[in-house]
Amino acid sequence: MSWVTIIWSMTASACLTMGALNLLVWSKQRTAWANLLFSVAAFGAAAFAYFELSMLRAQTPAEYGAALRWGHVAIWFMAVSVVVFLRLYLHAGRLWLAWAACGLRTLALLLNFMSGQNINYLEIDSLIQIPLFGESVAIAHGVHNPYTWVPQASSFLTLVFGVDATITVWRRGEHRKALVVGGGLVLFQVIAFAESLLVIRGIVRAPITLSLPFLGLVIAMGYELSREVLSAAQTARELRESEARMSLAVGAANLGLWIRDFTRNEIWASDKWRRLFDFAPSEHLTFDRVLQRVHPEDREVVERVMAEAKAGTGRYEMDFRLSLPNGEVRWIASRGGVEFDAEGKALRARGVSRDITANKKSEQESRLLRQEIAHAGRVSLMGQLASALAHEISQPLGAILRNAEAADLFMQHASPDLDEIRAILADIRADDKRAGMVIDRMRALLKRNELNARPLAVDEFVADVVSLTQADALARRVKLNADISSGLPRVWGDRVHLQQVLLNLIVNGMDALEGSSRPDRQIDVAARLNDARMVEIAVTDTGRGIPVDALPRVFDPFYTTKPAGMGIGLSVSRTIIEAHGGRIWADNDPRGGATFRFTLPLAEEAPPS
Amino acid sequence: MSGGTPVVHIVDDDAAFLVAVARLLKAAGYAVRMYPSAAELLTNLGDDAGCVVADLRMPGMDGLDLQGVLSRETNSLPVIFLTGEGDIPTTVKAMRQGAEDFLTKRGPKEDLFAAVDRALARDARQREERAQLRLLHGRFGTLTAREREVLRHVVAGRLNKQIAADLGISERMVKLHRTAITTKLQVRSVAELTRLVQAAGLFV
């Protein structure tokens, strides 16, 4: 049994195995350059172990010389790949040192084939047998090559490079990396350097056994790389976990996901997203096809927002409509971001989409309701008419003013353009006529202000008004109760006018509660059939009530107790109720608020003529 | 880019008022252009300097919508609103969105002229700023990826030695990169460089 054969063969096979493993890693992941370099170094070490064994077993000086000579090819691969590995893996070490070490090593390889038997010996004259592990092995004796300093200098520079890189990495705080990889290299280089000095120069009589310490370095590097593989496995596990959490959240939030790859012009989308946009699960998606789903009126905006995000803003957020093949319109809220490469070129966009049709609908409804309430706030007919009049008339008046001013300025010019001024005067006349027509129209409208009375269900018309004011009441923290029996007989009245009266009373009640800190800020609307066979509707608030001296005057025109009131609402209400043949009055509630009541005749009784 | 005489773009759905305001501004020496609707203005708007005088209430796209769209355009002209009767919530909203001014239709003409002058001045200023920013971005665009990386470290106040260690390059290379950066960006000091980076809105 030869120990030498066993040890060197095992060293070579260990190196081969680790090299093969890392080559496999690189072949799966082509950016893992560290693994490729590692495998080159390991294969180099395996090859050198073979050449070393050949040298130990050499029978003639020629055999020894040839093995040493070809061994330098393996050394070149080992040395260069280790330097580059360090540089790539540690991101440290001075670049010029790396270049110098590799350059000298290459020079050494050239000289190795061009001068003498090899770079170490000009000529090997004899082999000396010395004992090793109980058998005899060969070492060389001969004339040294004068260029032997070249590979030695390269080894020295590699050592310096390694020390420098190790220090940088250590200072960076990556102590383990510095110790294992940097330390491993430095130790190996010291041994290699010492061996080449002592053995090659014949100071010590020992065989060249570089591959053994190099195996140590290979193990150190392999240990470090395998840590990365382990941590990658850990990351993969965490990634799966986070993906599971993500899809849970996405599912719960009803979000559709999509990713658009700009370079390949492809879109990936989750099933949920495909359902939102009405695409089949296997349908091929392009941006144009997605755009076809967007409502024609929103298409331009969507395109522009996406283009802007791609061009630089990086983020986008928008609401738009889809117009689906079945004619359905769907509101989508979409947000996302664009990923750029180092040169600022857009790589891919990611986003989430959500169906917000229901939100949009309720938003629209509440906006409509608010508008109606704001509108109804200016309750009196006169007020509405006055505001409409002012708006209609301010246009022609504004035009007249601007025309007159323009004419004034033109007249100040050195040679006034009389045609222009004539045109201005004609326009002024036309605008004056327009304003006159607006006033005539309003006048006609005022005249036509007659009752359009018919039988009305009390519970229905009260419910209409209550639903109209409910949101306002909520915003003003007022509880609005209406409990009207559907069994009441129908009344005779003009629905629109009566709604205005009730609305006015409720809004007044809320105004009365303004500033009240009572916990029971509320308004009750009630209705009953009174002894005179009329329906009596009462609106009661929990405010401070009406001052006794003001009670008889609240229905007078232009009388008001409100800071911003006009004194019109109640007087118009009285006009309307009396026109219906009813009565309206106010009194204070014993509990401390005010009650407004009005009566209306029943529909089955003879209507007022 | 453009230059030339700034144009006052007037938008009003009321043809009579539109013509009257245009006449008044023309008589006062402004170059004017008229549009019957906001959409018409948006389709015909070039990149000339100027400002917009718009009616607040218009059918279809109203004044506030117009302002919203304009503010996202590359040529985001300042907007002056005209309104029949100014109600407070609308005024507040318009001013929040960056309206240059808010005038009633029958207010003094001097107010209108003053507002137009202010709007044109603001447009000129913004135009200048945008041009400046484009110039800066152009210069930054000439930097290589490595130079950008070095620049990021320099403006973070790091020393050459630290940068060299961080990037794994020699101190001499850092110095070379710095020289290239200052030459390309036409600056002399780190302070100036930092100011420039901030102005261009980089690394934020």
Image (cartoon, helix red, strand yellow):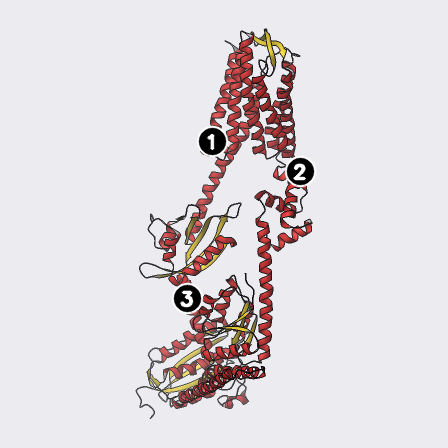
Residues under numbered marks 2 and 3 in contact, where contact means CB atoms less than 8 Å apart: no
Is residue A434 shown above or below A252? Answer: below
Q: What is the secondary structure assignment of the residue under circle 2?
A: helix
- Do the residues indicated by labels 2 and 3 lie within the same chain of the protein? no
- Give the label, 2 or 3, closer to the camera: 2
The x, y position of residue A404, in whole percent, is 53, 84
Instruction: Determine the CA span between mark 1 and mark 3.
Output: 57 Å
- Give the label, 2 or 1, closer to the camera: 2
Chain ID for label 1?
A
The image quadrant that residue A109 belongs to is top right
The x, y position of residue A508, in whole percent, is 49, 81
The x, y position of residue A222, in whole percent, is 53, 27
Quadrant of the frame with the C terminus of chain A: bottom left
Tell me if mark 3 has few (under 14), some (14-19) or many (20+) residues whose alpha carbon lies within 10 angstroms of its own: few
Asked if residue B204 can be seen in this view, the reply is: no
Chain ID for label 3?
A
Q: Which residue is mark 3?
A: A362
For residue B172, the mark is: 2
For residue A148, the mark is: none
Q: What is the secondary structure assignment of the residue under circle 3?
A: helix
The x, y position of residue A484, in whole percent, is 38, 77
Question: What residue is shown at x 47% (from left), y 86% (from top)?
Answer: A426
Asked if residue B175 can be seen in this view, the reply is: yes
Q: Which residue is mark 1?
A: A25
Amino acid type shown at disc 3: Ser
Is residue A348 shown above or below B49? Answer: above
Q: What is the secondary structure assignment of the residue under circle 1?
A: helix
Amino acid type shown at disc 1: Val
Q: Which residue is nearer to you in this view: A463 or A253?
A: A253
Residues under numbered marks 1 and 3 in contact, where contact means CB atoms less than 8 Å apart: no
Instruction: Determine the CA span between mark 2 and mark 3.
Output: 66 Å
